[in-house]
Amino acid sequence: MLQSKLFYKINKDKSSEIESVSHDLLVRAGFVDQLMAGVYTFLPLGFLVLKNIENIIRKNMEEVGGQEMLMPALNPKENWIKTGRWDTVDILFKLKGVGDKDYALAPTHEEVVAPTAKKFIFSYRDLPLSVFHIQNKFRNELRAKSGILRTREFVMKDLYSFHANQEDLESYYEKVADTYINIFKEVGIGESTYRTFASGGSFSKYSDEFQTITNAGEDIIYLCEKCKLAINKEIKEENPKCTKCGGIDFVEKKAVEVGNIFKMGTRYSEPFDLKFKDKDGTEKLVLMGCYGIGLGRLLGTIVEVNHDEKGIIWPKSVAPFLVHLIQLGSNDKVQATAQKIYQDLNKNNIKVLYDEREDKSAGEKFAESDLMGTPLRVIVSEKTVAKNSVELKERNKSEAKIIKIKDLQKVINNVYNLL
């Protein structure tokens, strides 16, 4: 991608109205644009990151047997009446259609997936089953805050599982919990993210949240100093001792919830009469599990964890580009060398942002590069070209090094394990 053609705009000045580091950096670096409170446009840079996160999640959901589908955001009122949530969910967006018909914009999809599954599940032979989708959700939050960490429209991954018995549900639940830990490692927040014992709310007595420690968090968790199990503040009084090791020493931390999982049992199969015929011929209600991750919130949390005073530091797994190629100077040899490197990296499927602009100083280019956070910066200048070399600097390191152009691809492969 040529930087002169990229649809973005850098803003050097931090706004006093911005509530979180991720909001500040993502807006100033041209990744997102705020349309109104709680509603954001993902600009090309931000959309590339969002798609990388989506692909990591999709791969992991398929590995636990999830089949991808796409459910509608527009829901009939009748389904929400059946579950008793039309008048009890205070964040539900409601709207009128033709003929004065009532609809909801889905904040979650139990009211869709359960009646859909009823059309396909009849026998124990149809179970277990797990399906997922990645879809826009709508929640009429009283106060949208902290940029994309809490919004009114957002992209969410929902996985739903269906089981014949509790043992099978428990087994699959633990498998997904392990997979979530893997996802958060892959996107670069694994060391800061903890499986957290929590209240189940309207779904079940207890659930599991995945909380990432950050000062931008609006949740409080208590981390066991002995085994690192976390407990949500809502249920801490019920559990004075660690439920895993029995320890009593906890550290209080602020955190952002980046995922949650619930054993819903028959909470949503019962209203829709979702049953199956067991081996002995008896009819039983299907047991369900629900497993969610908000992609936008996860993106914002990645920035909260991975940044410095200069800007974002994207983990290579989610970065919009792997290499930021910066051309300093416009003489023929510098231009030709930079263009050749750009073409060669593209041929080798390395995502490159090429700053070929002639109207920006070296200082301006470096400042933008640091703010945008591309993992690897490659500088081509008269000085480096004279030695058939480039200057290479990793975003998360302070020192740069000079390497031969002929070795560049090999170095990139070694640094980022692309072999």
Image: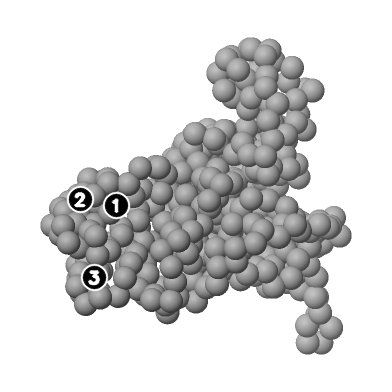
Q: Quadrant of residue 95?
A: bottom right
Q: CA distance from mark 2 to mark 1?
A: 7 Å
In what quadrant of the picture does the N terminus appear? bottom left
Question: From the viewer's perspective, is 45 left or right of 197?
Answer: left
Label number found at residue 334: 3
Marked residue nearer the N-terminal end (2 or 1): 1
Residue located at (50% from left, 41% from top): 189
Give the mark, 3 or 2, whose residue is nearer the N terminus: 3
> Which residue corresponds to mark 1?
392
Q: Residues within 10 Å of mark 1 (few under 14, many from 20)?
A: many
Looking at the picture, tell me which residue is in the foreground, 71 or 284. 71
How far apart in space, not on screen, are marks 3 and 2 (Cα)?
16 Å
Q: Position of residue 260 (x, y in %)?
A: 61, 43
Q: Is residue 26 visible?
A: yes
Residue 297 visible in the picture: no
> Residue 156, image x and y in percent?
59, 58
Question: What SS does tag 1 mark?
Answer: strand
Residue that numbered label 2 is attached to:
403
Q: Position of residue 301 (x, y in %)?
A: 58, 48
Spot occupied by residue 368 in the image (x, y as percentages of width and height): 48, 62
Q: Is residue 74 left or right of residue 129?
A: right
